[in-house]
Amino acid sequence: MGTYRQTVVDLDASAEEAVAWGRRGRSWLEEEGFLRPVPWRDGVVHLAGPRWREAVDLAPWDSRARIKELEEEPGDELRVITGRTVFFAGSGDSTSPVCPRCRNPTSDLPGSAIDTWWATGAADIDCPACAHRAPLPDWEWTNDYFAFAYLGFQFDDWPPLHPRFTALFGQALGHRIRVLTGKI
C-alpha cells in the first residue's frame, strides 16, 4: 500500500536558518488555517486545519472527501524536517539532473557529488552540455525526484497539494521551493 508523501522543500534556508524558517512556515500554515495544533502525548502535532481543502486538489483523491459536509481529512501530521537532507520523491528509479543554466538533462547521476554534499553540505557538478559548474542544490531533476536542502515540510497521505497553494506557501516563505511527490 505505502504512504503518499509530498514535501515542500525550501531551497534557500541555510543550515543556520532552517529551524527558524521551519517555525515561521508552520506558523503561517496555522495562521492561514491549513493546519491546526493538536495536543498529543507530551507535545503537539500539526494536523489538517479548517481550510485544508483549499490547499489540495481533491479531484484525483477519494471521491468521499469531495462531499463538503464530510469531516474526513488527511490523517497524518505535518512534519517539519530540518538539517542537511537529501529529499527524494520515493521509490522507483531516480531521474536525470537538469542543468540550471542550459536546462539540458544529463544521464550522468552525480553519485560522488551527492555523497560529498551529504557529508559536507557543499558539492558542485559540471554540465556535460554547456560545461557550467553549479552547486548540486541548484540543479533540478526531471520529475522533481531530488532536492538538496536544510528545510522541508512533509505532508504524508494528504491529497495532492494544489500548485496555487504551494506557490502561495513559497511566497509566504519568501524562498524558492521545490515540491517532491511520490509513494514510499
Image (spheres, grey):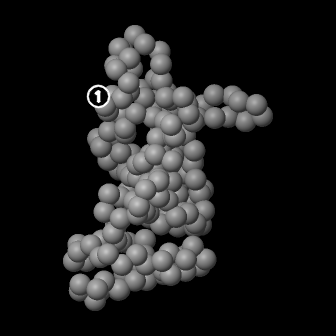
Q: Position of residue 159 (x, y in %)?
A: 40, 33
Q: Is residue 86 above or below residue 22?
A: below
> Looking at the image, which is closer to me, 117 or 37?
117
| Residue sticking out furthest to the top | 69
33 sits to left or right of 104:
right
Q: Is residue 8 visible?
A: no
Q: Which residue position is annotated with label 1?
A: 59
73 sits to left or right of 138:
right
Count up the numbered dots.
1
Residue positioned 39% across, 20% down in the render:
65
Q: Quadrant of residue 129?
A: bottom left
Name the amino acid type tagged 1. Answer: Ala
Q: Quadrant of residue 145?
A: bottom left
Q: Secondary structure at mark 1?
A: loop
Q: Position of residue 21 (x, y in %)?
A: 53, 54
Q: Is residue 49 above or below residue 179?
A: above
Q: Is residue 59 above or below residue 28?
A: above
Q: Is residue 50 visible?
A: yes
Q: Residues within 10 Å of mark 1 (few under 14, many from 20)?
A: few
| Residue sticking out furthest to the right | 42
> Looking at the image, which is closer to me, 3 or 40?
3
Residue positioned 56% across, 33% down in the render:
76
Q: Quadrant of residue 83?
A: bottom right
Q: Position of residue 85 (x, y in %)?
A: 55, 63
Residue positioned 42% across, 29% down in the render:
52
